[in-house]
Every structure is written in structure tokens, then in C-alpha cells.
Amino acid sequence: MTYQKPKELQRFQLVVAILASAALVFGLWSFAWYAMTSWAQKEVTDWVHLQRSLGAVVEYASMETSGFPTGIKLTFAEPRYEGAALGRMIKWNSDFIEVSAKPWTPWRLHVNAPGHQQLNLDNGAQQPLQFEGQAKSLVVDAVLGGVWPETLDLRLEDLQMSGTESIAIAQMRVRFSHSPTTQAGGTGISLRVEGDDLNFPGLLPRTLGDLIHTIDLALRVTGAVVPPSEADKAKSSLVTWRDSGGAIEVEHLKFRSGPLGIAAGGTAALDQNLQPEGAFTAKIEGFFQVMEILRAQGIMREGDAVMATMALSALSKRPKDGGAPFMNVSVTVQDSELSVGPLKIMKMPQFDWGLPTTAEETDTVQEPTPTPRDYKDVKPIF
């Protein structure tokens, strides 16, 4: 007679086996979660040390870990960053930052930093610019890379800051991707900027004021773009990038500020003095209003403004529905001079990269200004 276990015993053994398996899986998962959490903490620490080695100040009051078992969340209390960017020292601090990721992809970060924000910008010989306020939403999704992230997606909503000036952003989104292995001719950086009702004091020429009603910019940087390991190598990196044929392809730009509306595309590069130059095709609204403002502010001589207005009037068109007049023209920047069509409009301000000056400058060859495209390719946007 074959022995058969009582059903109660079979059920008990099954439950024990299930519980033991669950405990084993839970233990293994707990070990994996703590391992990934330790890795994420080490990555943060390494990044902080790297930024400090580059001269930046990165501090926080405390770092707390949570999110078990389905996520990893690092909460930093009172974070502070201070570093150089494009010739200015930037100081930023907030009440807290939450950095979260999934244990199986800890290099894909989700950053949340709403609420109180404080920002100081160095203003050269003048008093620093100081701003303080609140952001309804400040979210960043990023995939970590070597020095720069491989991808970054920043979304900002309802930012209101006051201080030296007032900063206000209804909404803005910045998407960035970087490929450090790209060779000449390939895409090293892609950038997309979208925003509505952006108020940045001093960002625009005083002709247009401070408010950007809307902006939609898509561009790509061709050639290898690798962040220099040391600050004093930044200039030589720019020169190398330029001399290897590096350029900025503006796939499209939609911009409106005050009376000026632009839809444009084209190519930009750096001249032998590391100043922007390029050729674009553009559809422009409000050009004559801007010319009048330039004349009234003394930026353009009255005679030049009158001649430019007369010369460009022939290119102006008015929509059949009675909308604002517009014109399709080529726009070039060469030798730091802005030209619209055949007319030289104004001298461009010198762009300060905030880079150290070396005793010996690298011998460079000036790249020719790209040939403007056919303006008829510009699609009607407004």
C-alpha cells in the first residue's frame, strides 16, 4: 500500500515552500536594492567631487534614502551649487531636491525641485543679480553620461522670482542630447527649447524689452563636442571643434517678442575670433517697427534707418486677410555685423565665452560664411 501524505500536510508544505521562495526572492531583491542604492549614492558623491575639482561648490545639509522596494529616492535637504558658466558665477540653492530612479536603471534619473528657489548671478564690475521666488514645478529627467548627461529633459512651470529684477516663466521645456563619440559631420549635440511668456531681464537687446512671448528652437551641433577635462582647455576645445568643421544647424526657430516675429533656419559657426557668424533665411514680422525703435533709441542713425526702411519696403508683403506685413529675407552675421538682405543693420556685441586668455593663441583659419538657402524654403508660420 502506497503511503499518501494527508492533504493538510501537503497544503502546509506548499505554503512553507511558497513562503520560503518569497523570502528568498525578497532577500535577493533587498540585497539588489541596497546594492543599487549604494551605487547611486556613490555616483552622486563622485559627481560632487568632480564638480568640486572643476572649481564649483556643491553642498547639501543631508541626504536621505527611501523608495524601497520599487524605486530609489535620494532627498537632499538645502542643496547649494556655485560655479562658473559662460563668464558668470552662478549661485543657486533650494529647500530640497528629490532624485529618484528605478533599481534596474539607476542611471536614468528623475529630479524634482519645486518650491523655493534662490539664484545669484555675477554681473561683472556691477552688483550681483539676486533673485528669489517660487516654482510650481521644476522637473528634470536625465540619463547620466561622463561629464555631460547623454540626455536631459527639463520642464519648468509657473516660476516667479523677484530681487534685482523680476524673472517670470509661464512654461518652458529644454531637451538636450549629447553623443561624445560623434565624429566630424555627425551630430554631437541636439537641443530643443520651447517656452511661453518668458521674462528674462537683460537677455534680449533693449530694443525688444525683456518679455519673450513664445520661442521654439531646434538645433544640432555637428562634430565632436567633448567637455574639456580642465577649464583652461575650454578655449582650445572650441578652436579644435571650429577648425574640424564644427557648425550649428538651426533646423527651425520660431520667436516672438514685442513687435518682432521670426521664423528662421540656417547655419552658424565661429569665426577666427570665436565670434558667431552664419547665414539664415527668415520670415520676419514687425521689422519696420523694430527699425523705428532702433532709430528712436539712437542705436541707428536716422539716415540709415530711413534708407533701410525704403530699401526693404520692396520686399515687404501683406497677407490677403489684412494681417501684419512680413518679408522673406536672408540674414547674415559676418565680422560681427548683422545684415538683412543687402543692408548692414548693426554691429553685433562681442560674445564673452568666459574663457581664460592664453599667451599663445592657436593658429586658425577663418571658415567661410555658409551660403544662404533659398528664402522660398521658409514655411509660413505666423
Image (cartoon, rainbow, N blue to C red):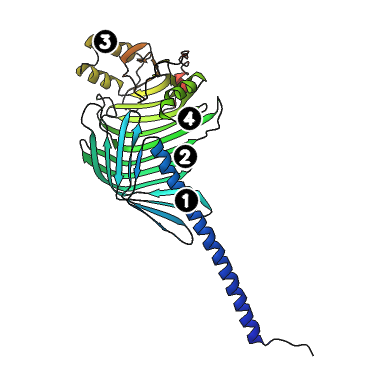
Please report whichever mark, 2 or 4, sits nearer to the chain's N-terminal start.
Answer: 2
Please report whichever mark, 3 or 2, sits nearer to the chain's N-terminal start.
Answer: 2
Please report whichever mark, 4 or 1, sits nearer to the chain's N-terminal start.
Answer: 1
The mark found on residue 220 in the picture is: 4
Whether the residues at callouts 2 and 4 have beta carbons within 8 Å, the answer is no
**Badge 4 element:** strand
Q: Position of residue 364 (x, y in %)?
A: 47, 14
Task: Using the numbered discs, state the Cα–Cα distance from disc 3 to disc 4 in whole angstroms.
Answer: 35 Å
Residue 88 visible: yes
Residue 367, relative to residue 214: is it above or below?
Answer: above
**Badge 3 element:** helix
For this rendering, which residue is in front, 272 or 65? Answer: 65
**Badge 1 element:** helix
Please report whichever mark, 3 or 1, sits nearer to the chain's N-terminal start.
Answer: 1
What amino acid type should be assigned to the residue bearing mark 3?
A: Asp
Residue 102 visible: no
**Residue that carries the numbered disc 2 in the rendered image:** 149
Task: Using the numbered discs, state the Cα–Cα distance from disc 4 to disc 1 in whole angstroms.
Answer: 31 Å
Quadrant of the image containing the N terminus: bottom right
The mark found on residue 304 in the picture is: 3
Residue 252, relative to residue 42: is it above or below?
Answer: above
Q: Local crowd at mark 3 within 10 Å, few (<14), some, or many (≥20)?
A: some
Residue depicted at 29% across the width and 50% down the height: 95
Please report whichever mark, 2 or 1, sits nearer to the chain's N-terminal start.
Answer: 1
The mark found on residue 40 in the picture is: 1
